[in-house]
Every structure is written in C-alpha cells, then in structure tokens.
Image: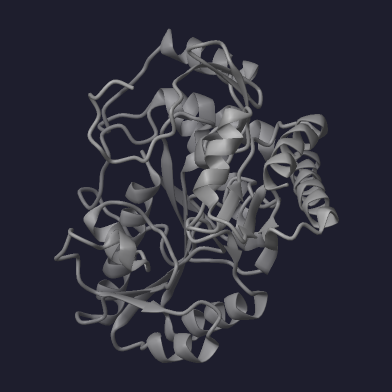
Amino acid sequence: MADVFMNTYHRLPVTFTQGEGAWLSDVNGKHYLDFTAGIAVNCLGHGYPALVKAVAEQAAKINHVCNYYQSDVSLAFAEKLVAACAPAGMRKVFLANSGAEANEGACKIARKYSLKKHGPGRYRIVTLRGSFHGRTITTLAATGQEKFHRDFGPFTEGFLFVPPGDVDALDRALDPSSVAGLLIEAVQGESGIIPQDEAYIKAAARFCADRDILLMFDEIQCGVGRTGTFLACEAYGVRPDVVTLAKGLSGGVPVGAVLGGEKTADVFEPGDHGSTFGGNPLAAAAGLVVLDTVHTPQFLGEIRGKGERIQGILRSWNHPKIKEIRGRGLMIGVDITVEAWPVLEACLARGLLILSAGTHTLRFLPPYTITNGEIDQGLGILRGILD
C-alpha cells in the first residue's frame, strides 16, 4: 500500500474501487460482503440508485453557497430532518460536516444556555465512561475512554465521567450549581455496542428536567434508523433538549446535525457558531434521499427484522467462542473468547468485512438494504472462521 497517508489508521490490506448494495470490489476484482457500511455511514449501501441520481443532478446545479445565503435543497433537507425528529421534541437544526462538529455544537449550546439562564460557573458537561464523542480536543475531552486521551492534553476543561447504569453516581454528578449538560449515547458504539438501560435513561431525563440541565443525545452512530427507530432516544420514551446526528444521515456524503428542542432551538445567535461546508447542497440532496427512504414505519420495521435475524442466527449456534450478543436493530456487538482483530483479518481473506470494538468484540453495522440471503451468507463465513 502507498506510504502517502499519515499513520493514523490500522488499515487492512485491501483497496476498494467500486461498490453496489452490500458488496465492495477491490483493485483485483475480488468481491466482499460489507457488514460495516463504512462504520454506519453507507446506510443505504453502495451505489444506491436514487442517492447517486440526486447527488449527480445536484452537482450539475450548485455545489456550494456561502452562509450569507441558503440553497433550496439545504432548506428542504433541514425542514424534512426537523419534521422527522419532531416526535422527540426537536424544533430547529444547525447543519455541520461531521459527528465531532455536531457534538462541539451541542457543548456550546449547553454552555451558552446555562450562562444566560443561570449565570457563570455552571459550565460542566457530564458524559459516560466508555463513551466516544469525537476526535477534536473538546470532543476527546468529552470521550470517557482514557486510551483516546494519551499524548493530546491539556484538554478543554469541564467534563466529568460517570459509570453507565449507575443512577446514584449520575445523581451525584448532576450538580445544578456547576453542570450545564449531560451528553449520552443511547447505544455506545465504539466501546462494544452497549445499549443503555431504560430505567437509567428515564432517571437521567428526570434529573435533567428537575435541575434544568440539558439532556443531550449523541446519536452519531445509533441514529437515523440504525437501531430500528429513527432516533434511538425514541425507544426510551424521552424527549432530549439536544440531539446530534451524522454518519448515515446523508448515506456517505459528509454531514452532521445539531437539533434543538424547546429550550435550545433559539440559543445560538448570529456569530455564535458556523461551518463553511455544513449542510452543503450535495450533502442535502443525499440527505433527502436518506430521509425519504428510512423514515417510514415499514423501512424501520425491516431494520428491526434484519437485526433480529442476525442475533437469532448467532444465538442458535450456541458457539463456545461467543460469550455475549447484544444490540438493537442493525447495530450489533458480539463478545468472543478470542482476539477480534485476527477474526477481522480472516473474514477479509474470505470476502467478509466486519468491525471490532475493543480487543474481544466484533461489531456489525451492515447497510439497511442488505438482504436476508446476504445476511445468511456473511454469517456463514463468520461461522466457518470461528469453527
């Protein structure tokens, strides 16, 4: 592989040139079944015809306008996204480029809201151990995993970590004299696909509401239908003050979003925040296709059904190398007794792409459009390797 990129990724020895549906092809013409979707990004698979058509047509019209103005397609995308998130209480959106940008925006909203409402000194943001919120200095500070912190301090101050599931610890941490917000993933992705307990989420919502602390859901990986509801927080019956989205939102075109509810929709004022490329027309055109496709009861039901199929097959094996299976929708983690990375390498050699999440966890994030036959085929490859 060419030595031109900075050494930031532990890359597997393959270079892809083309994709269709749940399949990718490399430079040698070998085909691979994709259970990764670009880490939950290519939610409609590769080369989805309606998305390809929308982006191509938009590229022939206008690629970018500066934020002094707006484009028709970006406005349509924002309106449709807010409408899709309205059941969770969302009213307005800021469009960015990535999940890290979206989470930066959420942190700024929390601090400004608290400053204006309660005065200085109330700026801390609580997150969970095992969380992952991004790679910028601030979102690294918000990430509750020490392995991501090495070599990059000092970090933005004001972040506190609590263990997930510990209601008493959360109660103690959410001090209304110093805390502005709670940033939480409904399903933690990078630490192994760990859904939060419903009682814990409802306790968190109650604490935040009683103390006027913003409840902020990071749905960068678990949102946009990934868990079988459009927003993962919907399954818990709570209405956050802020939701962040990215990854699958435009099906492979870079985009991020910060959505605000009743308390937060109007916190930002002109000059408070910005993003040169955020919500550009190409991303918006792709995003409209994703929203039109995913945000229907039938499609979301299919996601849930496919996830149940994967988990059901894995459980039916009763395999001695599988310790635990968990997840929601098409966001599934499998703890195994052997190291995960050699399994990834063996899968690659046999034409299957999967992910890891830690040393002993396999992670499945296939495209929503994957077929039952492709699910069976991919799991068959994995079974042979585990055997």
Give me the residue at 69% from left, 58% from top: 321
Within the image, what quadrant is residue 183 found in?
bottom left
The image shows residue 385 at horizontal and vertical percentages of: 67, 42
Q: Looking at the picture, does residue 33 appear above or below residue 268?
A: above
Who is closer to the viewer here, 214 or 193?
193
The residue lying furthest to the front in this view is 387
Q: Which residue of the protein is positioned furthest toward the left in this rendering?
A: 154
Residue at image position (74%, 43%) is 383
Q: Is residue 348 visible?
A: yes
Q: Is residue 177 above or below residue 3?
A: below
How is the model colour-coded? one colour
Q: How many labels were placed on the picture? A: 0
Give the x, y percent position of residue 242.
Answer: 46, 61
**Does residue 214 lie above or below 102 as drawn?**
below
Where 257 sits versus 293, above or below?
below
Percent of width and height locating residue 26: 51, 17
User: In the drawing, does residue 170 fall left or right of residue 291?
Assistant: left
Q: Is residue 78 left or right of residue 351?
A: left
Side of 119 where 53 appears, left or right: right
Image point 25% across, 59% down: which residue?
138
Q: Quadrant of residue 192?
A: bottom right
Which quadrant: the N terminus? top left
